[in-house]
Image (cartoon, rainbow, N blue to C red):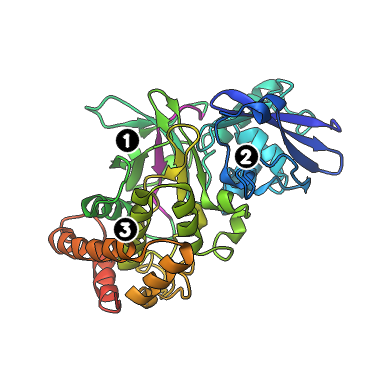
Amino acid sequence: MAEVSVLTVNLYGETIGTLTRVSGDRSLFSFMDQYVADENRPTLGLGFKDEYGQLITELPVKQKRLLPFFSNLLPEGYLREYLARLAGVNQEREFYLLWALGQDLAGAITVEPAGGEEWPPGLKDDSAEDTRMKHANALRFSLAGVQLKFSAVRGDRASKGLTIPASGVGGSWIVKLPSAQFEGIPENEYALLTLAREVGIDVPEIQLVEVEAIANLPEGISNLKGQALAVKRFDRTPEGPVHTEDFAQVFGVYPEKKYDTASYRNIATVLGRETGEADVEEFIRRLTFCTLTGNADMHLKNWSLIYPDKRTPALSPAYDLVSTIPYIEDEHTALKFARTKRFDGYTRDELSYLAAKAGLPETPVLDTALQTLDRFHDVWEKERHHLPQRRQVTERIDAHLKTLRI
């Protein structure tokens, strides 16, 4: 295997840096000189800014792993293991995993080999056709996360069908398949995203589709029955990709630390410093909604920033809104609010403390939370029996609401 391999990192199609692997499975990232010199450069991530707002150019060398920013672009858990096996790559060697998956990442980033090789030289002694097939199959699953999901394109509106591209690149929808472990997850998420929209939360376009109506699913997976959730990608527009980053990337932590490195107060602090009042209110609205619906899995990777003008961050539309308590009994949120992780600890006093510590004005924070509370109860009462979530989800949320103290 070559002692040195180089990947180019592109943002909006322009090369802004390189990832280099050297002997000993060490990797380093460096920015291109022209990107550093450009005062109007598009933002790669807040984690690359120092306390004075200047670009950080001296970055550490990593062993086997990549910098957290790039590590968070890769799938997690079983999906990572499956894809690594599919691609013939050791899942711990993140440089090569990113090589395999870098053409269809979240946001406006693409990663490709500087030498033009389709596959890491010497990694597998396969025929050219085998290599092309492995690359295409791996790319179909390239989106980060732990749920089995694909990037897809929409067919004609009359059929409401979706197709997984053979190459895995270019889809403007995310298709999230049914879970073999938890029944009704797509319907649960569809219901909650629908409710969230009614409450005033910014959510992308969604639809439920029969798995059998999704064309070009890999063999075996196409045998799944039931409904899948299709979510319009907010990082894809007719004008081109829009850059995003999740809060694990913002805080520079690896995916496995997404539950225990920061709090919702820390996220609010960043939003208060980097975005506007509307984004802070949207954050509080979303945090209140997740508390009311018993979502115990809103970790750092389930909150993201988006860069509509390529430079200035805003809170992205909501995603991964699921009531988790019908499946796993839990009285705690994924992260601390400010002092507590208990759902019933989400009180006016806790919100006041969060606002103070995050440097936010208290009145808008409390007003937004209480308005969301009132609006949610109105919508829930009207819609809870007309949405496709399982009865156990409705009953569990009803019981949960009685335990809250806000």
**Mark 1 and 3 residues: CB-CB less than 8 Å, in contact?**
no
| Horizontal arrangement in the rendering, residue 83 relative to residue 372 (left or right) | right
Dot in front, 3 or 2: 3
Q: Can you identify the residue that label 3 sits on? A: 285
Q: Is residue 174 magenta?
A: yes
Which amino acid lies under the numbered mark 2 shown in the image of this protein? Answer: Leu
Q: Which mark is residue 86?
A: 2
The spot of residue 20 in percent (x, y) is 77, 34
Single out the mark in the foreground, 1 or 3.
Answer: 3
Q: Secondary structure at mark 2?
A: helix
- Residue 128 is situated, as x and y percent measured from the top left of the image, at 69, 21
Tell me if residue 6 is in the magenta stretch.
Answer: no
Is residue 312 visible to us here? yes
Residue 213's label in the rendered image is: 1
Alpha carbon of mark 3 to alpha carbon of mark 2: how far?
41 Å
Q: Residue at x 16, y 58 (%)?
A: 383
Could you tell whether 254 is left or right of 193 in the image?
Answer: right
Q: Is residue 254 above or below residue 122?
A: below
Tag 3 or tag 1, which sits nearer the N-term? 1
Q: Residue furthest left?
A: 382
In the displayed structure image, the side of residue 270 where residue 172 appears, left or right: left
Q: Residues within 10 Å of mark 3 (few under 14, many from 20)?
A: many
Residue density around tag 1, few if under 14, some if 14–19, many if 20 or more, within 10 Å:
some
Q: What is the C-alpha distance between the residues marked 1 and 3?
A: 35 Å
Q: Which residues are magenta?
A: 168-179
Give the left or right position of residue 102, taking residue 29 as reference.
left
| Residue 140 on image: x %, y % | 51, 34
Question: Quadrant of the rendered structure where residue 234 is?
Answer: top left
Query: Mark 3–mark 2 contact, CB under 8 Å?
Result: no
Amino acid type of the residue tagged 3 in the rendering = Arg
